Image (cartoon, rainbow, N blue to C red):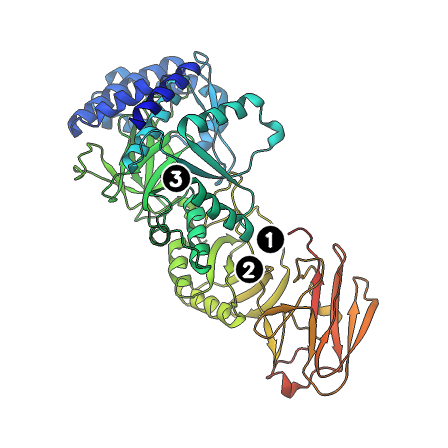
Amino acid sequence: MFECIHKIIFYMAEKLEHRNISASYKALYKNETLSQNEIKQLQLKKIKKILIYAYNNIPYYHNLFDSIGFIPEMVQKLSDIETIPYLTKDIIKENEKLFVNKAFVNIPRKTGGSTGSKLTVYYNQKSLDITAAIHRRCMRWCGKFLGEKEIHFSSNTTDEKIVSLKDKYKEQMKCIVMNRKNILLDIFDTDSVQDILTKIKLIKPVLIQGFPSIAYNLADFAEKNSISMFGTFKFYESTGETLYDFQRKKIENIFGCEVYNRYGNAEFGVIAHECKEHNGLHIMEDIIYLETIPNQMLKSENEIIVTTLTNYAMPLIRYKTGDLGSICDGKCSCGLPFRKIINMSGRIHDFLQFSDGRVISTSLILDILDKYNGVNNFQVRLKNGTIELFIVPGEKFTLDKVKEIQKDLYRVISHNIDLYLIDRLYLTPMGKYRYIISNNIKVKKISCLDSNKYGNIYNHSDKNIFIKLNNMICLEGFNDLENVPEGFFICSKANAKVYFQDNNPCVEILSSTNSQQTLYIYTNQNVIRQKVILIHGWNKYNLHVDKNEFITMKIDPPIPDDEKNGDKRELGVGFREILNK
């Protein structure tokens, strides 16, 4: 009864918007009862039709087919299209005007641009209705029915000033009809995470959809803070990023939900989706034709090639997706006739290629870091011949542990590694998380914590690595003011914090010697701002730091070497205030 009511609401809404999603959904539903041979015959019929259409209506294909002597009417089997050259994002961008189909009112959809410049793909209304119907199919495969509550996670990357009232109205209506709540993420700090977990408990959705990195971090936070979230929703649909086994396991264990993997992109919509067997992703073979080819760089990996069967506004034929996976023939025990994608190993851009031809997968780095408790997440890139690894450290993460990681990675990869300690991950313009980040991202080396034969270790984090001088802990030791790293900071509040003993923050400074010492405080211009006499024991000192002011602190006389456990540096701490962070 509940679903019937929402079917009526959905049908009325789509008529109001002049759409025809329900009819497309019914046709797609019937296709699920076909045999694999019947699916192939359906694909052949559709692919021949769209090839003929592309030749007659899309200038790029008219010119291409003539140049290679390809005659669409002569296609007799699916493999006949293998003589058509592969299509890439760069080819489309270079020939953008030649892909425009003036026969339709073209509706633009932009790709995320996470692996290069953005690309605009055009749909006609019918093809968009089919992609919406495919989404409804995916929800049913998960076990969620029309009208049951759902939450969508996404990054809030849209500028409110450029969103029209019409688009806002459409999105609001869509959420009402679908019984959906959008949770937009600007930042992913402690307060926002707690707020999201509270919203999940209040909304009580049947399904949540979003990037797996979001769900994983929510689950990790709930686990570490003993927040019970088990059973708060039934299904999690992973979209937009590669879903890794360690993410699936934690999401299922902490939330007590069933995780479904979904694979798609802006160019085609949903390409494949898991069924209840969770043994590969069924290809939407009634709306696309999918091939795989060996990747030249990654000899053991296959790249996914997709051809649309429904989008006549901008037919993409033999398009190289940059995604990696293999096709599995044979019927699934769930009864669906569609082949499956298995062994999805991310994107080509999830691999580092060295000048000597060696290729390193991010999964190898993941396996190494997984041995070390305290690494919350990581990203990596190969820049100017150097591996730069960005680590989000956990609580009480020591410099010694970072050195161990660096040495372990060097042993396996045989390449120098610069480690950066960061607070938050670098996301794509669409808010997606990638293990390999762009070389265009500028990373300031806040301070160098260590240099050794394996590489350098830089601090770029408010969650700092501590150097211990006997019972004193500071973030950076240096012998003179000339060696103070420019831009170094440790505080994020209006008053500076110094960390001592067990990494507990306080505004007290401890002198470990019995002799009287003087703490000198310098500003950017090396002018003594204040000096404080320190005696043995705790001395409370509240230091206010102005915006963008760089301050150093130095103790005189130095701490005796026998109290520093062999550390030759003098105590010094540098501050730069980071307001509203």
Does residue 377 lie above or below 457 as drawn?
A: above
**Residue 420: which numbered mark, if any?**
2
Q: Amino acid at mark 2?
A: Tyr
Q: Decide: marks 2, 1 in contact (CB < 8 A)?
A: yes
**Residue 205: which numbered mark, if any?**
3
Where is residue 293 drawn, in percent x and y? 30, 39
Where is residue 299 drawn, in percent x and y? 32, 48
> What residue do we see at 69% from left, 68% from top?
507
The image quarter containing residue 336 is top left
Characterize the local packing of mark 3: few (<14), some (14-19) or many (20 or more) Cα atoms within 10 angstroms.
Answer: many
Of the pair 570 and 170, the residue shown nearer to us:
170
> What residue do we see at 52% from left, 23% from top?
169
Give the distance between the C-alpha atoms of the residues marked 2 and 3, in whole angstroms: 38 Å
Of the pair 508 and 61, the residue shown nearer to us:
508
**Residue 443: which numbered mark, if any?**
1
Marked residue nearer the N-terminal end (2 or 3) = 3
Marked residue nearer the N-terminal end (2 or 1) = 2
Marked residue nearer the N-terminal end (3 or 1) = 3
Element assignment for label 3: loop
Does residue 59 lie above or below 200 as drawn?
A: above
Q: Amino acid at mark 3?
A: Pro
Where is residue 481 drawn, in percent x and y? 75, 70
Element assignment for label 2: strand
Which image quadrant: the N terminus?
top left
